[in-house]
Amino acid sequence: MSHFLLDGTPVPFAAGDTLMAAAQRAGQSIAHLCWDARLGPSGACRLCTVRVDGRLAAACTTHAQAGQVVENRTAELDARRLRLTQMLFVEGNHFCPGCEKSGDCDLQATAYALGMADMHFELLAPQRPVDASHPDLWLDHNRCILCKLCVRASHEADGKNVFAIGGYGASTRLLVNAPSGRLGDSALQASDLAARICPVGAILPKRRGFAVPLGARRYDSAAPPEAPASASGDRDDAH
Ligand code: SF4
């Protein structure tokens, strides 16, 4: 089997593998927020940016080739990841102390893993509506990081196309495919992968908030999201 080098460690890959897929399968960690092994790649979050033979590339969309020299955990790349994470925090309203996803959130765990101690940028403080029209789910656009995981899950796994991304630039938003644009008028069900895959606190089940005690939440004890799924405890939706 062919190999590439990830921070000096040989990683085997199969034809068609991306760097991310091969690394995850080999138990190597590359930071990510928008990648999931069950879905096609997106390239939205850019957390997985590595240097491939000296050039920046997203590990989730770059196909592995024999002999590639891939740099991942360097000070330069982790500094880029920290800035990207800070941008995601200031773009939305991520008040973790009042969020039901705290301790179970990939964005928050990534920030901890990168040693993020402040926002660095000015808070944009958006005032987007919260959609509580669904009987079992609610959607807070102010926490959405536009990772498109729900979009891809609804299309590729659920076959419903409930979600899409619309707008452009700073006004880009998650859209709900219903005549009213409301979650309660869509075909989304709580059992759908699209309803369970959100890595942050944007799509959440109703009547289940704060059910897990502090100390027992996923990231109170499990590895951060850049770690391989096998090391991430008993999570429902392994990334
Ligand atoms: S709602 Fe969640 S899964 Fe969907 S795009 Fe926003 S952050 Fe990603």
Image (spheres, grey):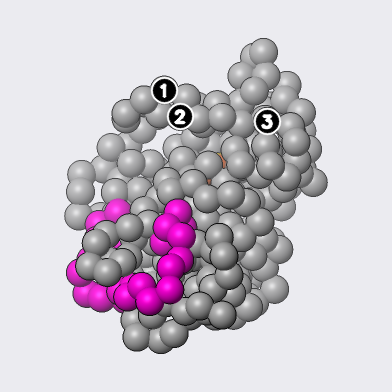
Classed neighbour count for the residue bearing mark 1: other residues with Cα under 10 Å, few (<14), some (14–19), many (≥20): few
Magenta region, residue range: 59-84
- Position of the N terminus, as image quadrant, is bottom right
Using the numbered discs, state the Cα–Cα distance from disc 2 to disc 1 in whole angstroms. Answer: 6 Å
- Give whichever of discs 3 and 1 has the lower sequence position: 3
Q: Residue at image x 47%, y 79%?
A: 3
Task: Kindly identify which residue carries mark 3.
Answer: 161
Considering depth in this image, is 69 or 29 the residue closer to the camera? 69
How many numbered marks are there?
3
Task: Verify whether residue 60 appears in magenta.
Answer: yes
Q: Which residue is denoted by mark 2 in the rendering?
A: 173
Determine the quadrant in which ligand 1 lies: top right
In the image shown, does 145 or 40 lie closer to the viewer?
Answer: 40
Q: Which of marks 3 and 2 precedes in the sequence?
A: 3
Q: Element at badge 2? A: strand
How many C-alpha atoms fall within 10 Å of the one at disc 3: few (<14), some, or many (≥20)? many
Distance (Cα) linking label 2 and label 3: 16 Å
The image shows residue 172 at horizontal and vertical percentages of 40, 29
> What label sits on residue 167 in the rendered view?
1
Quick check: marks 2 and 3 in contact, CB under 8 Å? no
